[in-house]
Image (cartoon, helix red, strand yellow):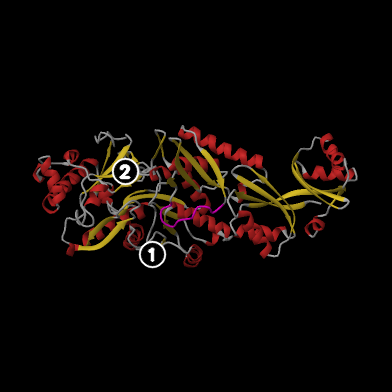
Amino acid sequence: MIWNEKFETMPREEMRKWQGEKLREMVERVYYNVPFYRKKLQEINIQPEDIEGIDDLARLPFTSKTDLRDNYPYGLFAVPMSEIIRIHASSGTTGKPTVVGYTRRDIALWSEVVARILTSAGVERDDYIHVAYGYGLFTGGLGIHYGSEKVGATVIPISAGNTKKQLQLMEDLGSTVLACTPSYALYLAETIEELNIDRNRLKLRVGIFGAEPWSDSMRKKVEERLNIKAIDIYGLSEIIGPGVASECEYQDGLHINEDHFIPEIIDPETLEVLPPGERGELVFTTVTKEGLPLLRYRTGDLSRLVYEKCRCGRTLVRMEKCLGRSDDMLIIRGVNVFPSQIESVLLEMGETEPHYRLIVDRENNLDVLEVQVEVGDQFFSDEIRKLEQLTNKIRKNIESTLGIGVKVKLVEPKTFERCEGKTTRVIDRRKLD
Amino acid sequence: MIIKQLSVFLENKAGRLTELTGILGNAGINMTALSIADTSEFGIIRVVVSDPEKALQILKEHNFSVNLTDVVCLMTENQPGALARALELLSAERISIEYMYAFSIGERAFIIMKTEDINRTIELLRKNNIELLKADELYNM
């Protein structure tokens, strides 16, 4: 099923034309309504009427997360506050949160794009959607909620927390779709096993997972343990929240709703646009949003774009599954390390729980990476020799993937809190100096 | 003859052993024999208790990595050379010992061991008239 045939299957040339027109309108809006953008555009001598088509996008200035923080809270809004009907904010792990605002039309647009991604994941009006994303300032809960209502499915706005009760209701109410972070999905699977709940009493068939990077091996694990199809969705509050992109039933890249959010891939060093297919930093321009339109917003996420038509019939450009935000990337002894790489190694080995934490420290001016891994009952051996073999095997596998030496430490089960929002997997003690 | 020994994974953290023994004590579970194998990073505590299944359940509920391991308990005279004689039998049959721990009470010595093949071990020791303790005898000692 395709929610919006017109845009989701639009031929490339037509899409480019649409994007060009919308871009011109957007530049006009930000030029006259957002002093920050007017100044930036004037600095490079661009007037709104200079925008003739989508090819002019590359001439425009970038927006960074810092720009949003510098203009905290409402400085980049393009409409008077009386037009804003909703505020959301992203969790500020460092400093202030990022505040975003939506007009009535933005909320309608948001519902539309979420309806599209739910439909591409196979959700229909007969479905019961268990929304276990947090409700509140985080865009996950309410974003999926409005889109689900638009589809006409039955929404169960359970939000995050109280896992046992969640499972009880999931069974009683007959939830067919689970929407949450992938790490919470895994936690639910564990709890189902612990409580010996008969999986057949649950009707779940699809998972809509996003808000944190996760590997394909973690996907396999979630699919096996919950016996569902796990669909990767992508979104960030600055752009709109969930609804920016999503996989279809073929799980072969995430279709971007590019009639609203125009993607580019740039080289994060030179800031040059890279040719299609090359991997780099993902940048979005929100051409239709009214409240907070952003020009070339640098997401920090690494991906690549595929323009070939998908087997599902959609022509929307696809982005490769995001393996990490560049904020998550650690540079250890000059080598780039993504937590998701370590997750993949652990899941492929299948001998430990996929719960881990990375501790980075500096000893004698040298970076050291310690990987702490939970030892589950099923892998625990009463023989020291076997546990040491396991530790060495994990260490060798991680070292051969990352190309740097690591220390592996086995820790007791449930050492790491199971977080219902985004999981903290990295503790970087180097920053404390 | 097979004894269910509790094996628990413990990180080297202050208070973990106290916590474990406290949990068992509060549940009214007695410990008959105990040994700890340690490395610089973690330890494995091996313990024979009065009710292994119940102890397993309770420790799992408290988020310990724990399992039950099959071991045997030999009983010999508390005399020089008694253990050597038992071990010679195993060596001759090339049965490897994974680990063992022992205690003695008066004239008797008790040796708890895990070998690579528990059934062959039992068969061999019985054939050679080495006394093996029944599980209940050890649990309730």
Q: Secondary structure at mark 1?
A: strand
> With B138 as the anchor, is B53 left or right in this view?
left
Chain letter of the residue beneath label 1 in the structure image? A
> With B24 as the anchor, is A179 left or right in this view?
left
**Residue A384's x, y, as percent?**
66, 42
Q: Is residue A184 visible?
A: yes
Task: Identify which amino acid the numbered label 1 is placed on.
Answer: Val
**Residue A291's x, y, as percent?**
20, 57
Chain part drawn in magenta: A413-423
> With A236 as the anchor, is A400 left or right in this view?
right
- B16 relative to A311, above or below: below
Reading the image, the residue beneath label 1 is A155
Task: Identify which amino acid the numbered label 2 is placed on.
Answer: Gly
**Residue A362's x, y, as percent?**
44, 39
Q: Residues within 10 Å of mark 2 (few under 14, many from 20)?
A: some
Query: What secondary structure do most residues of the magenta stretch adopt?
Result: loop
Cα distance in 3D space between marks 2 and 1: 32 Å
Q: How many marks?
A: 2
Q: Nearer the viewer, mark 2 or mark 1?
A: 2
Chain letter of the residue beneath label 2 in the structure image? A
Reading the image, the residue beneath label 2 is A300
Report which quarter residue B134 is drawn in: bottom right
